[in-house]
Amino acid sequence: MKIIIQTILALITFNIVQAQTLIPIPDTLSGSTINLFIAEGSKQFFNGFNTNTIGYNGSYLGPAIILNKGQHVTMNVHNQLTDTTTTHWHGLHVPPINDGSPHNPIMAGATWSPSFQVMDKAATYWYHPHLHGKTMDQVLKGASGLIIVRDEEEAAHILPRTYGVDDIPLIFQWQTLDNTTKQIVLNDELDNTTLVNGTINPYVNVPAQVVRLRMINASSHRFFEFGFSDNRTFHQITSDDGLLDAPVALSRLLLGPGERAEVLVNFSGQAGQSYYIKQYGTQLPAGYPGGPAGMMGGPLGPLDNTNFDLLKINVQTATINPVTSIPSTLTTNTVYSSVGASNFNVSITGIPPMSMTDFLMNGVKYDMDVINMTTSVNNIMTWNITNQSMMPHPFHIHGNHFFVLKVNGADPPLNLRGRKDVVIVPPNGGSVQLITKYSDYGDSLLPYMFHCHILSHEDNGMMGQFIVKPDGFLGLSESISVSDKILFYPNPVNDLLYIFIPGIDVHSSISCKVYSISGSFVLSATSMNNSSIDVSGLLPGQYIVQIVSGTYHNSFTFLRE
Ligand code: C2O
Ligand code: CU
Ligand code: CU
């Protein structure tokens, strides 16, 4: 009897709270100047409950930034939080100084304005905060948004691309919402809710034709095993950072935190019908968060290892010029040859072995002052990542795409054979081999990050950093000790650039030579330690400063606004 009453109560509660809601389509921003305002807000996920959130240009999530390959863009990120933040352009090929990593903090009240050329191929990227130790906090509360890059190659194909009509952004998230207060709980291991575009119990309307869905797993912790309620076949056309060689037919799509996929779904002739995108949690591999228990024990979240509806899809009449077929080919991805490549090995372990939150890479945790690997511009490098822990880790590298060569020693599935920036490393001795090449943006001092994209793992130090040295640039690369600390501020700078070398007497004189990013000498100046040089005469852009004080020498890059 008790159970029956509880069930009835649960059903009533479900019906009262869970009215189906049309998902919002995020606004778009485009052009050469993008203004983002990150701020605290509040949102009613459940009627009558104000949930505290963080969003960009709104209370939860952010606008979709539409960029064209080749264009220049200046991003003005205005930090209206009471806390420091950073904004990372996940997947975009930008120099470390513009990457929005933990090394590019934006203080409360400040504006950060990185400026760069869009060098990436058409695909769906995203942006989110990356302040070390606070990433999960800020992202879970809602701070993230999509970046859609368009290019001529993609435009030449007959593909759906009318944003919000037949080209639909779908931001899938797991969340933990407190049962009583409906506040976002910063414990991603207990996720009890899924959202699409910030909406609970969501639906979307699509036309009866081929539709493109831009899908992202923007969760902190859990994996999605997507499929349709009628088990239909759909076609994946992009991996994280670009088109696949050809559409890949799938009935299930696995996305780990941080991964994206664009898929084509053919709803031709199905007007008036409704379908669901479902989570097939029972079909996730054992030990994958959201799926059946692995060696670490039973499922922790109430929705783990279950199949349930994520998003209702109502098919409506077709548009006037519908796309009705799936292209047969898309692009040619040319994977670098690994012959003669250098190797970097990453070994993932848990501490203790059963831990769900504490993981090491090569035996260490992240330290902002330690460089874990150094490569140089144009160096082709294979990364061999092995996972001795009992759960999978979505491994992400900043600054450039990579190609997956092997998963557990075998050729990767077809939908992992395009440009990627996150790859799932399977548990219990699993491995991934991938290959990278950084063709430009060498920086002797500022690193790029590599890390697990489970945000609690990242915040707990499952992250490392690497330097891409400018290849033979000014002969500087050999002489630099990256462990030498140097402070310079502000950056970007308008006029006075302050330089401080800790450990050197404040009365020492420092001689500075400033070079443009292409290597031409532009300015020489002398400063006292902890004083400034005047760079107001320089044109806006990125510069490299070589500094010498007695036997001490070093270099760094800065941006003149
Ligand atoms: Cu999406 Cu280093 O992050
Ligand atoms: Cu990233
Ligand atoms: Cu991890």
Image: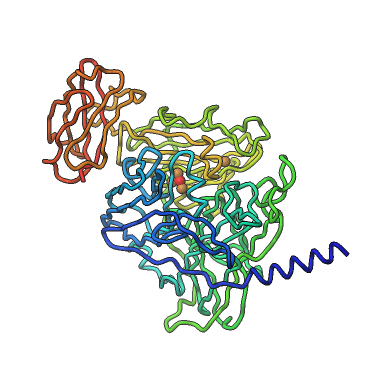
Image x and y of residue 529, in percent: 22, 23
Residue 509 lies, with reference to residue 52, above or below; the image says above
* Residue sitting nearer the eye, 307 or 12: 12
52 on left or right of 375: right
533 on left or right of 301: left
271 on left or right of 428: left
Residue 402 in view (yes/no):
no
Residue 442 lies, with reference to residue 370, above or below; the image says below
Badge count: 0
The residue located at (66%, 56%) in the rendering is: 179
* Residue sitting nearer the eye, 526 or 286: 526
Q: In which quarter of the image is residue 307?
A: bottom right
Image x and y of residue 377, in percent: 32, 36
**Quadrant occupied by the N terminus:** bottom right
The residue located at (18%, 23%) in the rendering is: 528
Q: In which quarter of the image is residue 274?
A: bottom right
Image x and y of residue 15, in percent: 68, 71
Residue 252 in view (yes/no):
yes
* Residue sitting nearer the eye, 365 or 246: 365
Image x and y of residue 350, in percent: 62, 33
The residue located at (31%, 47%) in the rendering is: 110
* Residue sitting nearer the eye, 223 or 114: 114
Q: How is the image coloured?
A: rainbow
Point out the residue furthest to the top here.
Answer: 551
Point out the residue furthest to the right here.
Answer: 1
